[in-house]
Image (cartoon, rainbow, N blue to C red):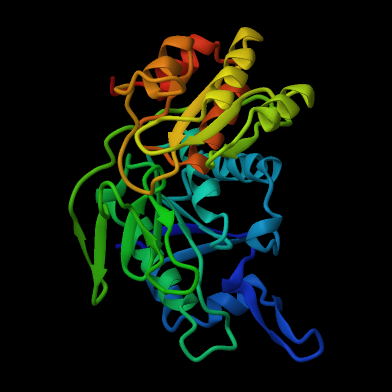
């Protein structure tokens, strides 16, 4: 029986870092070979194709880099010699890249995004375990057609649902609204469910400026108007609670809608969906009636990614609304 054939794309992040005395801090350092060699018996689990994509810290990753990575994944997935794909990534922006890949790669083959919360100089470096677990997941037939998954600390989450929830804990990635897709215990996988919704966007070119704004008490409309002056292709707003904003923000957003710029609303709360139930000035019903698009359970950073790829795929505003409000 042949071993699974897994491509591993190394993009950087803490999993590829160590403490450097000269710099006085943690810096990118490890090659793909060094990371692979840290996992005992890894080549017994799979035939591995290593791809050195880069050594980017999470905050250095841009949407253009994500698009390049997506195309690399698509090329590998199209090969009959590859059964699954793993992407190593910095955890700070991992959920955004994972969701970008989920939206822009069209394959049944598993794509697993991993990282590490500890660097290779620390005794509890979690990179090797996460990489071993990801190979098991990428090799498992049960994960075909599930889209992009995130695998850290034995928890397997859907890219569309997961968020980084803690600045330091190993088990930082969690899906507040839904829970994990599966878990790995003693190298044995238990699958609980499948992701409930996926959509593929054939992105040709990404918009240059799609800002994400967070509501705060007393917020006026100036930031929205600055975004319009700078040529925003779309705007994402993190609203209060179930989907409400200050009156000045409401009126500024109507200016954006009048210019045919898509405005997407999410909640700044970590759990729950937004709804158009309140009808006071600036509340959800007024926003919805004015043409604001409601993003259901997505958080701000994911809604921004989805808006970018929808615009990049040439969607009209009505198509964008249908993509975000599929559960209505």
Identify whether 130 is placed above or below 148: below
Count every numbered label the image shows and give the total: 0
Instruction: Report whether 121 appears left or right of 19.
Output: left
Q: Return the residue nearer the eye: 299 or 71.
A: 299
- What residue is rendered at 32% in x and 32% in y? 197
Q: Quadrant of residue 160?
A: top left
Identify whether 241 is placed above or below 25: above
Identify whether 84 is placed above or below 42: above
Q: Is residue 206 visible?
A: no
Instruction: Report whether 19 appears left or right of 171.
Output: right
Q: Return the residue nearer the eye: 157 or 69.
A: 157
> Residue 317: x, y in percent?
53, 12
Which residue is farthest right?
Answer: 22
Q: Return the residue nearer the eye: 253 or 38.
A: 253
Q: Is residue 319 visible?
A: yes
> Residue 288: x, y in percent?
41, 16
> Residue 233: x, y in percent?
67, 22
Q: Quadrant of the N terminus?
A: bottom left
Q: Quadrant of the C terminus?
A: top left
Q: Quadrant of residue 56?
A: bottom right
- What residue is rendered at 59% in x and 36% in y? 219
- What residue is rendered at 45% in x and 69% in y? 131
> Residue 95: x, y in percent?
49, 51
Instruction: Report whether 145 appears left or right of 94.
Output: left
Instruction: Report whether 12 appears left or right of 274.
Output: right
Q: Quadrant of residue 57?
A: bottom right
């Amino acid at each position: 029986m042949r071993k699974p054939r897994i491509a591993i794309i190394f993009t950087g992040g803490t999993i590829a870092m160590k403490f450097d005395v000269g710099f006085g801090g943690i810096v990118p350092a490890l090659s793909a070979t060094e990371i692979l060699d840290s996992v005992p018996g890894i080549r017994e689990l799979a035939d591995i194709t290593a791809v050195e994509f880069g050594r980017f810290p999470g905050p250095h990753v841009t949407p253009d880099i994500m698009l390049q990575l997506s195309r690399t994944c698509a090329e590998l997935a199209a090969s009959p010699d590859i059964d699954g794909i793993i992407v190593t990534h910095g955890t700070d922006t991992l959920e955004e890249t994972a969701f970008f890949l989920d939206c822009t790669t069209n394959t049944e083959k598993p794509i697993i995004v991993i990282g590490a919360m500890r660097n290779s100089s620390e005794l509890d470096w979690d990179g090797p375990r996460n990489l071993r677990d990801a190979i098991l997941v990428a090799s498992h037939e049960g994960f075909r057609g599930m889209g992009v998954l995130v695998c850290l600390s034995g928890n397997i989450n859907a890219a569309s649902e997961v968020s980084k929830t803690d600045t330091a804990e190993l088990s930082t990635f969690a899906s507040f609204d839904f829970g994990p897709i599966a878990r790995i215990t003693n190298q044995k996988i238990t699958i609980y469910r499948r992701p409930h919704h996926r959509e593929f966007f054939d992105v040709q070119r990404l918009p240059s400026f799609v800002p994400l704004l967070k509501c705060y008490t007393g917020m006026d409309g100036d930031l929205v108007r600055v975004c319009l002056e700078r040529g925003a292709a779309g705007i994402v707003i993190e609203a209060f609670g179930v989907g409400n904003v200050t009156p000045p923000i409401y009126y500024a957003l109507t200016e954006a809608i009048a210019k045919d710029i898509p405005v997407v609303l999410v909640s700044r709360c970590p759990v729950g969906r937004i709804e158009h139930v309140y009808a006071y000035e600036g509340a959800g019903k007024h926003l919805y009636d004015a043409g604001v698009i409601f993003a259901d359970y997505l958080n701000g950073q994911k809604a921004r990614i989805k808006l970018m790829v929808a615009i990049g795929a040439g969607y009209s505003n009505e198509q964008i609304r249908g993509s975000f409000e599929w559960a209505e």
